[in-house]
Each structure stands twice: as C-alpha cells, then as structure tokens.
Image (cartoon, rainbow, N blue to C red):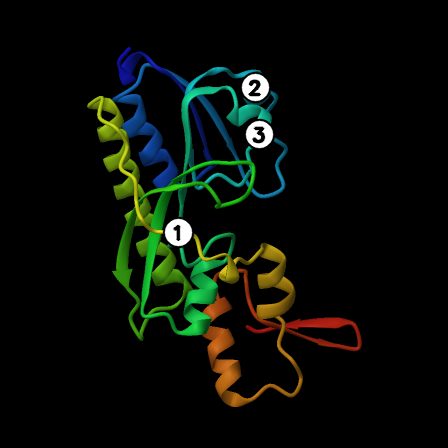
C-alpha cells in the first residue's frame, strides 16, 4: 500500500497559517485524510475516537491524543513538536528565551500516551539571536516545523523508513502552560531590574503579557 492510499488522521490547530499549509501539502500526497482541528480548551472531536487507519500526524495540535486513539494507527503515530528535545512540553520558546539558550529547534517524534516522550525521529536546529523575542523565535520555529513536516511526509510518500535520531528528551526542562502563566509571567514585587528584563523578553507577546498581583488584583504590563 502506498502512502497516497493510506488512511491518515491529521490533528492540528485551527486557523493557523502553517497548519493550513501542512494540510494542503498532505492533501497533495494522500487521498484519505480525516481532519481534526481545534484550539486550547476545545474538546476532542468525536470523530477522532472512531477513527482507525494507518498514520496519525499531529502538527501543532492542542490535544494530548489518547492512547486508545494512538493504538488505532496500524503503522505509526507521529507528532511535530515546536521545540527541540531540550524543551519538551509547553512554552519551549518562552523558557529558551528566559534561560538564554543559544540554540532552539523543532522535533518530530513517535507518540506515546505521555507528552513528548516517544522516540525521536528527526530534529532541525537553528540559532537564537540576542535580538530575538517571543514573536520572532516563535515565527522561525513554526517555519522550521513546517519544513520538517514536508520532509517527513516526503519520506513516507517515498516508501522509505523513517529516520531514527540518537537524541533523547531532556525531561528536566519539561514545562506546562500553567508554569508559564502562573510562574514565569507573574512578576514578584521585589524583582530585580535584570530579572524583569529576562521575563519581559520571555513572555511579552500579543495578549500574553507579564503581570503583577497586588492584594489579589492583577495588573498587566502594557
């Protein structure tokens, strides 16, 4: 059976330009695709639980795909993570900026029931510049993730085996959205000037801003 005739479940974020580009590329290389898209807080579509087929491709999806769904992929279930193996979980861009990482990247890996824990297939790395902020680093990581998606789908289309990376996840750097929102974005009243600059660089992005709590009232940076 060719990849073009395989049954594929594609899970991604709704309304995102790079997700739409990934889906369009997939439709040019596969004829039987079930699409599940959504955003943070959305319920998993019922169609995901009834799907059974060959491949699951999760590209910037906001869901942790249940093990019962992963088992329904006969050949493989892979995820495209917008961060390097050093940054599993959420908020990789934010903590990379906060910690002053000199390098960032994106990762393709096999999925298990545990977040960002499956064997790594391939990564793409790139430098972090001193001028980078959340917006610029996020943009480059999403562009690299799309490149990685194109490359992996091309491998599958060609009938070749997926690569096996020697890299492993660094679980000591695992973070959640709650870590970002309740810890990194929250500014202590006695913060130093240097620490404030680090947190602003790492968290100031669109409506997501650092905040200070005084007597239970949140004050957001403008």
Residue tagged 1: 168
Q: In this view, does 10 lie above or below 144?
A: above
Which residue does the image show at 41% across and 59% down from the upper left?
A: 86
Numbered circle sitting on residue 67: 3
Q: In this view, does 219 lie above or below 68?
A: below
Q: Earlier in the sequence, mark 2 or mark 1?
A: 2
Between the C-alphas of marks 3 and 1, the distance is 21 Å
Q: Position of residue 61 (x, y in %)?
A: 48, 38
| Left or right relative to 179: residue 168 | left
Q: Would you say residue 185 is visible in this rendering?
A: no
Could you tell me which secondary element the residue under label 2 belongs to? helix
Which residue does the image show at 39% across and 51% down from the upper left?
A: 168
Q: Quadrant of the C terminus?
A: bottom right
Between the C-alphas of marks 2 and 1, the distance is 32 Å
**Label 3 vs label 1, nearer the camera:** 1
Q: Is residue 115 above or below residue 9?
A: below
Please name whichever residue, 195 or 65, is drawn nearer the observer in this view of the structure: 65
Q: Which of marks 2 and 3 is nearer the N terminus?
A: 2
């Amino acid at each position: 059976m060719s990849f073009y005739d395989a049954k594929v479940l594609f899970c991604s974020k709704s309304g995102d330009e790079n997700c739409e580009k990934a889906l369009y590329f997939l439709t040019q290389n596969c004829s039987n695709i079930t699409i599940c898209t959504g955003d943070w807080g959305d319920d998993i579509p019922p169609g995901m639980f009834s799907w059974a087929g060959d491949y699951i491709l999760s590209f910037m999806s906001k869901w942790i795909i249940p093990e019962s769904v992963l088992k329904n992929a006969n050949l493989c279930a892979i995820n495209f993570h917008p961060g390097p193996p050093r940054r599993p979980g959420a908020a990789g861009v934010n903590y990379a900026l906060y910690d002053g990482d000199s390098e960032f990247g994106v990762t393709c890996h096999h999925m298990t029931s545990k977040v960002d824990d499956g064997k790594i297939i391939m990564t793409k790395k790139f430098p972090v510049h001193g001028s980078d902020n959340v917006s610029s680093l996020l943009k480059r990581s999403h562009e690299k993730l799309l490149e990685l998606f194109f490359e992996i789908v091309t491998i599958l289309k060609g009938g070749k085996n997926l690569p096996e990376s020697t890299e492993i996840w660094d679980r000591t750097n695992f973070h959640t959205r709650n870590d970002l929102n309740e810890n990194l974005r929250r500014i202590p009243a006695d913060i130093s000037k240097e620490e404030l600059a680090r947190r602003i660089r790492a968290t100031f992005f669109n409506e997501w801003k650092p905040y200070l709590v005084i007597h239970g009232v949140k004050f957001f940076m403008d």
